[in-house]
Image: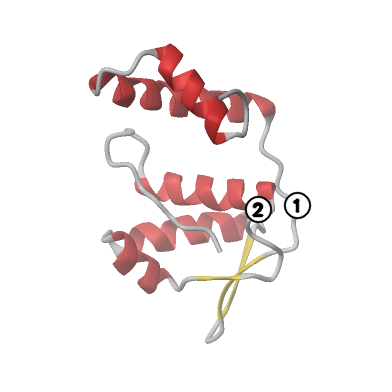
């Protein structure tokens, strides 16, 4: 199961963030075919957003055959294989890095300090 996190400052609509997280979860193997997702109501409560936002995301993924909803049983990851295009992955990585660098800079960290810490976190140079 993946943990959903929404970023209100990103400018990306919440329903799109949910869709992207599910797609990336499937592509990365964090979500497996047949795995049950939280109900739309439970996810809306957890994320503190409108129920219709989650329903919209789930419906769009159902149309794409990424998710399957079984009345009375829940919403499940479908058997379709999801691949995220390299261009989309690169754009997302750039967004993540930009946000990370901006937050770190606000605390006074230099890019060199960030690189050193990232290497330490990945078991690289100490």
- Compute the Cα span from label 2 to label 1: 8 Å
Residue closer to the observer: 102 or 47: 102
Q: Residue drawn at (59%, 24%), measured in percent from left and top? A: 90
Marker count (numbered): 2
| SS label for mark 2 | helix
Which marked residue is nearer to the observer: mark 2 or mark 1?
2
Percent across and percent down for residue 37 are: 53, 69
Q: Is residue 98 left or right of residue 85?
A: left
Q: Is residue 1 above or below residue 13?
A: below
Q: Secondary structure at mark 1?
A: loop
Left or right for 46, reference 97: left
Extreme residue in the bottom direction: 72
> x, y (%) of residue 107?
24, 23
Q: Nearer the viewer, residue 6 or 16?
A: 6
Residue 23 at x, y = what percent? Answer: 60, 49
Q: Which residue is mark 1?
A: 81
Kindly identify which residue carries mark 2.
26
Mark 1, Cα crowd under 10 Å, few <14 / some 14-19 / many 20+, is few
Is 9 situated above or below 50?
Answer: above
Q: Earlier in the sequence, mark 2 or mark 1?
A: 2
Q: Nearer the viewer, residue 21 or 123?
A: 123
Identify the residue shown where x is 69% and y is 64%. Answer: 78
Q: Which quarter of the figure has residue 55?
A: bottom left
Quarter that holds the N terminus: bottom right
Residue sitting nearer the eye, 112 or 96: 112
Q: Quadrant of the C terminus?
A: top right
77 relative position to 46: left or right: right
Q: Which mark is residue 15?
A: none
């Amino acid at each position: 199961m993946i943990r959903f996190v929404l970023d209100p400052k990103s400018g990306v609509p919440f329903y799109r963030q949910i869709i992207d997280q599910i797609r990336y979860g499937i592509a990365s193997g964090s979500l497996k075919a047949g795995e049950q997702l939280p109900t739309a109501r439970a996810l809306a409560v957890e994320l503190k957003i409108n129920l219709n936002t989650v329903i919209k995301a789930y419906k769009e993924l159902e149309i794409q055959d990424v998710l399957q909803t079984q009345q009375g049983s829940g919403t499940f990851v479908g058997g379709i294989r999801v691949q995220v295009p390299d261009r989309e992955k690169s754009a997302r990585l750039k967004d993540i890095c930009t946000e990370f660098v901006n937050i770190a800079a606000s605390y006074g960290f230099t890019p060199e300090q960030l690189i050193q810490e990232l290497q330490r976190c990945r078991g690289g140079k100490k």
